[in-house]
Structure formats: C-alpha cells, structure tokens
Amino acid sequence: MDDALSPSPTSPSATSPSSKPPFQPPVWAFPIAFLGGLFSLFIRPVFLLYQGKNSADAFWSHALRSLDWTFILRQSPFLLFIIGVGLIFAGFRLRSAFSGREWWAWARVVGSFLLGVTFSLVLIHELLDIAFFRGAFILAVAAYAFVILALLTLLFVCPLPIFTSDGEANGRFESFGKGLHLVVILFCVWLLMPAIPAMLGVAAAPPTAPSEGYGSTPGPYSVITQTYAYPMPAEVEAIIGDVEGDIEFSIYLTLPEIPVDERMETMPLAIILHGFGNPYWETYVDWATHLSAKGMAVAFIQYPSDVHPEGADTFDLIEAQGMSNHPQHTPRSAAIAAAIEHLDATALDENRSEWLDSVIGNTSIDPSHLWVGGHSLGAGLTFRTLDESLMRGWGDESLFIALEAPYAHSVDTELRGDLQTLPDNTLVHIALSEDDTSVSPCYGVWHQQRIISRDGAGDLATGQVFLMTIPSDRHGFPPMVASHYLQASQVHEVLADWGFYRRADAQADYMVARSDGNSSNDILAGDYLLNETWLANMGEWSDGVAVEEITVYRDALNEGTEEYQDCREESTAWD
C-alpha cells in the first residue's frame, strides 16, 4: 500500500538514458484488480439468484468446496500451520528478492487480484457460516487467512509505524494505507484464533464412535441394494421442476445378506423419505445401511419434492402447528402413494421380484412390523406415508416412527394423514438439531403433540413419544455442531454416530426382535429406546469433559421449560 510503483534506482531502466522506461500500471489498477477479484466469485451466485434460485442453491457449490477442504485439512491441522507460516516467509523472501525488478508492479496487480479473490472466499465462508456451518469449518477459513497474510507480506512492507517513515511524517493517504494494512492483519489473526489450538494439537478431541454395539460399524450383516423405478402419475410428471428433472424416481430396496442357516421366517419393513431437493441415495445410504444391517428390508423412496402445481407462485403461505398450506403437498403425496403401491407389488406380493428370492430366499418381508421415518420435508411427509401404510394394515403388530429435523405436513385433512388408528404400542423418536438453520423446531414440537393425542383418539402412553434436542458442543476440535444435515452421509461424523446412528441401530434391533418373536432382544432394545439416560449420553472429549447431552422431552410443549414455549404462539394461526 505504501510501496513505490516506480522502478528501483538501481534497475537498468533508471541508469540507462538510452533505454525506454517500461510501461507501469496506473495507481488505480491496484484497487480495481482487488475489486475484480473480490466480485469474481459472486458472479455465478448472483446470476443464479437472478434466475430465481434461492440463496442456498446459489451458494451450494461454495458450501461443498468448504466441506471438501475441511475434510482434507482435518487430516493434518499442524501441516496447515507449517504451510501457512511457510507461505508468509516465502512472501517476504520473494518481495526482498524481486521488488526492484521492472515487472514487480505488474506482479503486485496480479497479487491484488488474488487478494480480492481470497477476501471473496472469506466473505462467502462467513455468510455460509452464519446460515449453515455454525462454526464447524474453522480450518478452511484459517487457510484463507494464511493466504491473505502471505499476499500482504509479498505485496507490501510492514505497516508500522503508521504515521511516520524514516523520521518524517507520512501523508494522509499513506497513513490511511498503513492503517488499513494493519486492520487486515488483525482481521486475519481473528480468523486464525479459533483454529490455533487445533493446528498446534492442543485442542481436546471428540469421543470416538462406539467400538461395538449401537452406533458402531453397521452389522451384523452386510447389505445389498437394488433399484426399482416406479410409474409416476402423469399429473405429477408434468410439473416436476428443474432441480429433480433428470431423476428417474425409484425405490432403493436394501436387504441384509443373511446366511442361509440364520434366516428368519420374516423381516420387518422400513421406509425412508428424503428431504427437499435431495432425492439422492448417496445422502441417505448410511442410514439405510445401519437399519438393514440389523436384519430389516429398507425402502428408500425417491419422490419429486421440487414440483410446481397451479397456484404454487400465488398462494399466501402459512406455516404453523406442524402444518403448512403448500399446494405442493398434493403432487408429492400422489407420488408417494404410487411408490408405496409399487413397493407392495414388487417386494411384498406373492409374485415379488426374483432378486429378493436370490438374496433372502424364503424369508418374507412383513410390513405388519413397520418402521417409517424421514428427514426434513420427508419427515413431514411421513404422516402421509403412515396413512397409506395403516390403510393397508401395515404396522399393526409393531410401529416405529422416526422424524429427523422434521418440516411440516399438509394442513389439508385428506393429505395430513389419519393418526387415530395408530397402534397402542407405537414408539416415536423426534430429533431436532440445536444449530438447524433450515427448519423451525416448532414443527417437531407440534408433531409430538399430534402423535401423542392420535388425532383425539386417546393419548399414547407417557414415554412412548420422545422429542430430543441434539446439542452442539465446541469444546474441542473438530467442533461437534448439530446442523440440519446431521443425518446426511456426506457429513457423517462422530456427532452423528452418537446422536443419530446409535438410535437408528437400536430402532432396527427392536423391530427385528419384534418381527422374529425374540422377546429378550425386544425388551433389551426397547429399554434403550425408552431410556432417557442412555439417549442423552454423548460420550466424553479426550480431556475427560463430558460432551453436552441430548435433552429429552416427553411433552416438549407442556413440560414447563422455556425452550419451546414460543411455539405456543402458533396455537391460533389456523383460526
């Protein structure tokens, strides 16, 4: 910021009167290059926003990049520290060696552009951190801070002292530049501070995943998956949006590979529904694998979430008491009904797919023992799925409902599902994440109220419907941040092993025991599922500090706690 832009007096262009001085960039080239770099990474997101995409879609590629870089950097945080310090030293050495060259001013223009690009990365990261990351990705932004410091060292001299140089007072422009330089350095230090304990190896490590039992490696069986495309209703096919326009909507049926001498007469059925805009098997493969490896048949149903029925752009949205008035609920429900019909014919009928016979032999899939659940929008649509299932007599022997980070179901009485026929022995887990910035916790709170009451048909017994808040804990590194995407395979970390997959394993064990008539395993798994102390436990950090425990509610709206009392304000929204 205070370097002279003219060539060094010792350079050939300064000492040879016959040589023509090389063209040098104007002073304004440096801020223009910086601004060009700063805005370069915003071009695509702004274009996507202009096309009508939401902010999450517009910046999704940047979020994925941060995720990828974070997992790479976590392999060796200390190496990041060494490389970062090395870059700063290299910047100083390069400046000392080449600052007198004729082309140095142009190198500073390029460096100014790169400085702008790096600031753009920092700005996008901080925006995503507010909206999604919630402090989970501290190494990526630390890497950006090191790059900024290296570029500052390469391009500019030390900013101190700010107001004088060689005993003489600086001009206002030069003092402003030095002051700005110092502010940027302090900003980089601020970015680095959260990551320093991790890079130096002094931060406490989170607990490892359970080495055995629930939450450990899926088992005892390996699993295999087959896809079955199902016929989409024509009226739904016609209104599927671009987000899912290239999807061949299918049922991903996962089965356990059980040795012949261990095969049971029947196995229970599980149905998983995905979140909005994420019908990808890769996102939920870990969930399905954990369930199926215990001995369940798991059907992951792809349904079109991005649909555009008539009136979708003009209605006045109301979201309250776990419900919404989206017209999109109608085509989504129609697709799910078609998928369940196809599942019935493909896997449960006497003329089932030959592939099933090759995997499970004479074992039949018994939907009277039913596990049904979903994530986000899929959790809301679980109510419609329950309606389709209960009408077929499914789940009448045992039923488990798992709502993970749930969104709303339809307010329409024909689409919201009828819970009056829920069996008396129904068990339910509703899980919320502390740092979920995508859905309100009130959806889950109201879902708990509705399920307990069975739509007025008589309350389920106390302790059969648990609502849980999975906490974030930033005590050590990596921080354990409970986000909306805790259940996604792409971000499967130890927090998910303790806060999600332990429960999934116990749920599957319970359902398999019920289907097989194994009362001892039934009681054991059931004890875990209803044991608030076991559900709350999240292990310990490496320094012996207990990880923040899951909070378990039997009746979140009426237990007298303040956490979800704001949800009561929705009581009259539909009046």
Image (spheres, grey):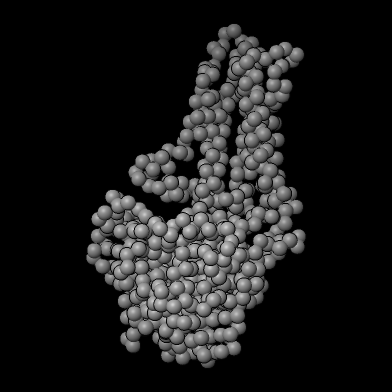
Q: Is residue 509 above or below residue 273?
A: below
Residue 537 makes an appearance in the image: yes
> Where's the C terminus, which quadrant?
bottom left
* Count of labels in the image: 0
Position of the N terminus, as image quadrant, is top right
Residue at horizontal 75 percent and vertical 52 percent from the top = 202
Q: What residue lies at 44% left-to-right and 78% top-to-bottom?
A: 458
**Residue 401 drawn at (x, y percent):** 47, 73
Question: What is the x, y in percent for residue 272?
Answer: 44, 70
Residue 251 visible in the current orientation: no
Left or right placement of residue 172 versus residue 132 in this view:
right
Residue 75, position as x, y percentages in the image: 65, 55
Viewer-side residue, 220 vs 434: 434
511 above or below 493? below
| Quadrant of residue 547 within the rendered picture | bottom right
Of the pair 62 and 94, the residue shown nearer to us: 62
Task: Say if 552 sits above or below 67 in the image.
Answer: below
Q: Report x, y in % for residue 352.
A: 35, 84
Q: Name which residue lies at 48% across and 86% down.
A: 515
The part of the image, by quadrant, that contains residue 242 is bottom left
Q: Is residue 232 left or right of residue 30?
A: left
Near-viewer residue (58 or 143): 58
Q: Which residue occupies 56% across, 11% down?
A: 19
